[in-house]
Amino acid sequence: MSLEEGAGQPLAHYAAWRRAGDFIFLSGIIPVNPQSGTIVRGFKDIPADVRQLVGETTDARQGPILAQSWYVMESIRHTVQQAGGEMSDVIKLVQYFRNLDHFPCYSQVRKLFYDGQPPVSTVVQVSKMLPSTEVLIEVEATVWLPLPP
């Protein structure tokens, strides 16, 4: 599964992102392709050239969260670019995990998207996520992107 046009788009009837003055707020993004409804389940669901970059492993516990983390962060990058910004404009992330033990794998992938100062962060563990128990992570972002004068 590759990121297609529309990545980061919601599965239901709400906005993927919305501008409020100099801020852009992204809805929570999950590792699901909105056009096909396909859930990222592991490395086979992300591009081959990205697998090694994110630390492809045969570990059945790490594979799904590494692949889902990349898909979610890449969807955020794509959505922020659609709104006119860059990942360096992301000032805050709120990360929801079904299992906080997944945070180190996610953090490893997130570093690939921020070569400079990372955004401020909130991490929360939740008991369930939509649309399936296979969804391990959801991330929402706040972007500071001043309007042109």
Image (cartoon, rainbow, N blue to C red):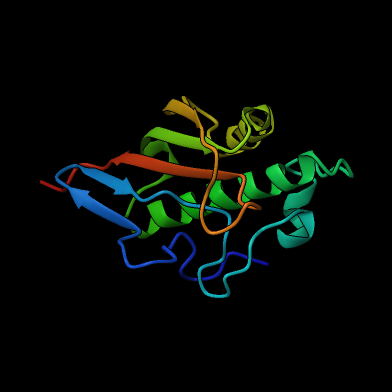
Answer with left or right where residue 24 lies relative to residue 47: left
Number of marks: 0
The N terminus lies in quadrant = bottom right
Residue 43: x %, y % from top left: 77, 54
Residue at left 72%, top 61%? 45
Residue at left 47%, top 51%? 29
Residue 56: x %, y % from top left: 82, 44
Q: Farthest residue in the right direction?
A: 58
Residue 59: x %, y % from top left: 87, 40
| Quarter of the view holding residue 146 | top left
Residue at left 44%, top 26%? 121
Q: Farthest residue in the left direction?
A: 149
Residue at left 40%, top 46%? 86
| Quarter of the view holding residue 107 | top right
| Quarter of the view holding residue 128 | top right
Q: Farthest residue in the front direction?
A: 127
Residue 35: x %, y % from top left: 52, 74
